[in-house]
Amino acid sequence: MSLSGLPREYQRAISKLCILVLGPYDSEQFLQMFRDDLKQSGYAGVNIVKELSDPTRGQEETEDQFWLHKSEYWVEKADVGFIVLLKDAKNDGVEQELRYLIDFHKDRIWRFNVLLERDIRLSSLVKGLIEDWTPELTQNYSKREEFSKFAKGRLINYVKKLYHEIEKRTEPCKYD
């Protein structure tokens, strides 16, 4: 279903939906194309976590700890999200973000989707986490272009589920 096929009230709510993309930083070009494709489809509130402002950094935090802290901070503020794991990418940070979500935000898991590139090699720990994930929220793709198609379908479902939560907002999605 395209956005034009949605009732008007849902179409107005779409700009208020805050969408977070978590993925490997060494695949930033793909993440930007994924984000841009969603934006061109009308989802103005989609952001890659790296592009968002930084929370306050703890004095003792290492750089790696800080980047994880930043992701954790924004996971709590997003309406929905996509966790992207790609073959031939450094997915360590994304795997930590997934683990954090499952360990500390079980109440928010239904808002996040795991997108896997087919034939990706994952640690047994991450495989176990994903196997416990709600099946409809995890998808395998052989072509990266398929990620956006699935995401758009999921986002229409989220707009419907979250309509009463997001329609009350007076402004488009703002991450602050």
Image (spheres, rainbow, N blue to C red):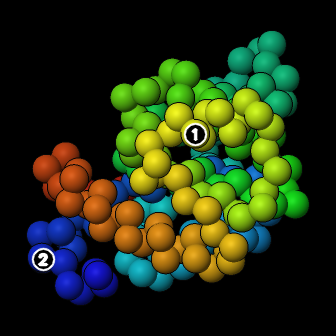
| Residue at image point 65% right, 33% down | 128
| Residue at image point 80% right, 13% down | 60
Q: Position of residue 67 (x, y in %)?
A: 74, 35
Residue type at the position of mark 1: Glu
| Residue at image point 12% right, 69% down | 9
Q: Residues within 10 Å of mark 2 (few under 14, many from 20)?
A: few
Q: Position of residue 145 (x, y in %)?
A: 63, 79
Q: Is residue 36 visible?
A: no
Q: Earlier in the sequence, mark 2 or mark 1?
A: 2
Quadrant in which residue 118 is drawn: bottom right
Circle 2/circle 1 CB separation < 8 Å: no
Instruction: Assign a secondary structure to mark 1.
Output: helix
- In the picture of the structure, the residue carrying the numbered disc 2 is 8
Instruction: Assign a secondary structure to mark 2.
Output: helix
Residue type at the position of mark 2: Arg
- In the picture of the structure, the residue carrying the numbered disc 1 is 131
Camera-nearest residue between 23 and 78: 23
Where 167 sits versus 165, above or below?
below
Name the quadrant of the N terminus.
Answer: bottom left
| Residue at image point 70% right, 25% down | 57
Camera-nearest residue between 165 and 146: 146
The label shown at residue 153 is: none
Q: Position of residue 74 (x, y in %)?
A: 53, 39
Of tags 2 and 1, the one toward the viewer is 1
Q: Position of residue 87 (x, y in %)?
A: 81, 60
Name the quadrant of the C terminus.
Answer: top left
Q: Is residue 137 left or right of residue 15?
A: right
Q: Is residue 4 visible?
A: yes
Cα–Cα span, label 2 and label 1: 37 Å
